[in-house]
Image: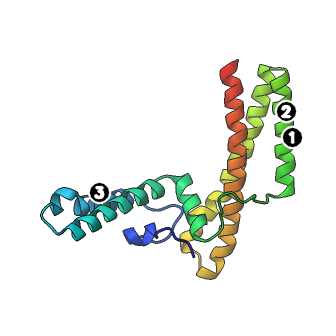
Amino acid sequence: MPDAPDYFSFYGLPESFRPDEAALKRLYYAKSRETHPDFHATSSPENQAEMLRQATLNTDAYRTLSNADHRMAYLLRQHGLLEEGKQEQLPPDFLMDMMDLNEQLMELEMEPDASAQAKVSAEAQALADTLDAGIEPVLAGYEQLPADHRPAALQQIRTYYLKKRYLLRIQQQLATFAARS
């Protein structure tokens, strides 16, 4: 069972990859006002400590849930699907595509070439766009799924998340090359 607090329960929201962001912000501000130290200055030290704990939890929850990447990683961790430092398996076809992109990056490192770099960059962006388009219906529909269908959706989202992280590293390398030229 995860040790992290349940941020969705904290706000009384359903677990979702696409929460209502306006509602999330309203809840964050409401909790911020509720737990503000100025309103508890004359209360017991225990109550002040609890309000500080609640205020910290509110900040952590909002920071996590208001950022799509952080929210996705958080949800995957909550379901025991992401473990820090563990080597994750990715599908072989994806790894072959990445190997191809990495080889092209190594060639660019040896012989910088603006048009080759643009081609690799476009390939990486096309892969990212395809990944995003493929996962969007799963993310958008997750909240409505019956409980017994959620594990399969979470596995798909986990694979997407890992692929996206891998691809992001390649895009960062490309950005580094672009900055040099």
Of labels 3 and 2, earlier in sequence is 3
Position of 26 with respect to 164 (left or right) is left
Q: Assign the C terminus to one quadrant of the image.
A: top right
From the image, tell me which residue sits under label 3: 29
- What percent of the width, then of the height, locates residue 115? 79, 22
**Quarter of the picture holding the N terminus:** bottom right
Q: Secondary structure at mark 1?
A: helix
Q: Is label 2 in contact with label 1 (beta carbons under 8 Å)?
A: yes
In depth, the one of 2 and 108 nearer the eye is 2
Depth check: give the residue in front, 152 or 85.
85
Residue 104: numbered disc: 2
Q: Residues within 10 Å of mark 1 (few under 14, many from 20)?
A: few
**Which amino acid, mark 2?**
Gln
Left or right of 57 on screen, residue 157: right
Residue 174 visible to an observer of this rendering: yes
- Which residue is labeled 1 in the image? 100
- Indicate whether 43 appears above or below 118: below
Distance, label 2 to label 1, CA atoms, is 6 Å
